[in-house]
């Protein structure tokens, strides 16, 4: 989870924005008016940031004070006067000297608030690399939620947090959602193949992503929302074509897969820019971005498998030897060679689905 600092210094509907921020459990509220902290619960960090103003004699309920060295002096000076106060440093990056200043702050300060004036994220990459072994936190100013999402992913690690001034009610909710970058891991189940059947022609989807899959990684695919099988990526060598480690030959177009926010998507719905959940044989997950989906007519094979508790799972794949699924321990199994008794890895969600979202209702799939 990334940190969300909501900057209310220039907000008009301050009370409405604060109510939304507290409901969404943002990590910190940032203001230059100490009275704004009145009534805020202890669960939210109170950050005083008087950019362009002098420091007061006392800081009231503030938990953190962010100083601009150009006006307030170095953070260490304030920290010496107020030993119980957390102090951070603000740096505006406009050129090479200020970039070096930001790197030094990232290595030494408890909190570093960074404002990058140019749209490139290369300077942020440099600061993140410089702070790789530091114990402090980087908070980067974002102009909107879209930029925040980019900041969270820079150099794979991203900034520790984002500070953003909401333009309207709803922005705090969107920013909090963008900060939830982790995908929950899954409990995979060993399924036993009970039958396979050649079912003729149909359309299948190859999902080409913008990421390299590992050899024990793929995406979950199934005909029903309550049962999916782990389809391996094309990371393993084949005798007649090069490996394509970004691709999963996933299944028939009606099939479900897991996307963002634990929502299911039909393979036919995926397109460039969509998110799908990559899963390895241990159930570890990450979101990857779809670059292209290839839908073509191919012979299909239907695979039925059973969980230890008797639940059935169906997967329809391209009927070809080079299309494969994963078994326990990362064993790679060719779809056309699957036979009763073989073990494959699957996932058994407990919720039914409505437009892809999990919901507790009656739903019969067969």
Image: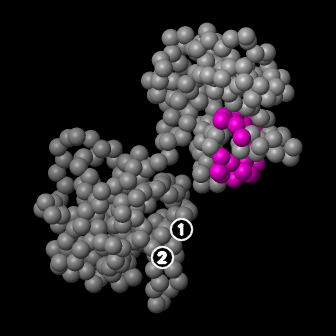
Cβ atoms under marks 2 and 1 closer than 8 Å: yes
How was the colour assigned to the protein in this rendering? one colour
Per the image, label 2 sits on a secondary structure element best described as: loop
Measured from the top left, where is residue 264 in percent x and y?
Answer: 36, 52
Could you tell whether 107 is left or right of 294 in the image?
A: right
Q: On screen, 28 above or below 199? A: above
Image quadrant assignment for residue 205:
bottom left
Q: Is residue 74 visible?
A: yes
Does the magenta portion include 129?
yes
Query: Which residue is nearer to you in this view: 146 or 346?
Result: 346
Does the magenta portion include 286?
no
Q: Which class describes the residues within 10 Å of circle 1: few (<14), some (14-19), or many (20+)?
A: some
Residue at (77% x, 43% y) in the render: 104
Residue at (50% x, 42% y) in the render: 1
Please give the label number shown on residue 235.
2
Could you tell whether 274 is left or right of 361 in the image?
A: right
Residue tagged 1 = 212
Measured from the top left, where is residue 324 in percent x and y?
Answer: 36, 77
The magenta stretch is 108-134
Image quadrant assignment for residue 8:
top right
Q: Which class describes the residues within 10 Å of circle 2: few (<14), some (14-19), or many (20+)?
A: many
Q: CA distance from mark 2 to mark 1?
A: 8 Å
Measured from the top left, where is residue 226 in percent x and y?
Answer: 24, 55
């Amino acid at each position: 989870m990334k940190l969300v600092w909501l900057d209310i210094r220039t907000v008009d509907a301050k009370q409405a924005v604060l109510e939304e921020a507290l409901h969404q459990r943002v990590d910190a509220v940032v203001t230059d008016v100490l009275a704004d902290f009145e009534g805020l619960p202890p669960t939210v960090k109170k950050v005083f940031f008087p950019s362009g103003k002098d420091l007061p004699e006392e800081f009231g309920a503030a938990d953190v004070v962010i100083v601009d060295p150009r006006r307030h002096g170095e953070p260490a000076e304030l920290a010496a006067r107020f030993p119980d106060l957390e102090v951070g440093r603000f740096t505006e990056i406009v050129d090479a000297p200020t970039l070096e200043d930001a790197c030094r702050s990232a290595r030494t300060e408890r909190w570093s608030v960074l404002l990058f004036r140019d749209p490139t994220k290369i300077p942020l990459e440099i600061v993140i690399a410089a702070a790789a072994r530091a114990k402090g936190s980087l908070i980067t100013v974002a102009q909107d939620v879209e930029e925040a999402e980019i900041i969270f992913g820079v150099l794979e690690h991203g900034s520790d947090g984002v500070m953003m001034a909401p333009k309207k009610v709803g922005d705090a909710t969107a920013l909090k959602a963008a900060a939830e970058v982790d995908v929950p891991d899954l409990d995979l189940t060993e399924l036993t193949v009970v039958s396979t059947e050649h079912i003729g022609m149909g359309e299948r989807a190859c999902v080409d992503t913008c990421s390299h899959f590992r050899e024990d990684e793929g995406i979950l695919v199934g005909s029903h929302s309550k049962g999916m099988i782990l389809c391996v990526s094309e990371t393993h060598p084949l005798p007649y074509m090069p490996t394509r480690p970004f691709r999963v030959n996933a299944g028939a177009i009606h099939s479900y897969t897991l996307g963002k926010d634990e929502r299911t998507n039909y393979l036919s719905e995926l397109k460039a820019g969509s998110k799908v959940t990559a899963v390895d044989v241990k159930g570890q997950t990450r979101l990857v971005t779809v670059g292209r989906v290839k839908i073509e007519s191919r012979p299909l094979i239907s695979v039925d498998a059973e969980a230890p508790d008797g639940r059935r799972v169906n997967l329809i794949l391209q009927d070809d030897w080079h299309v494969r699924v994963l078994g326990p321990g990362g064993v790679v199994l060719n779809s056309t060679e699957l036979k009763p008794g073989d073990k494959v890895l699957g996932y058994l969600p407990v919720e039914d689905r409505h437009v892809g979202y999990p919901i507790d209702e009656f739903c019969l799939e067969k």
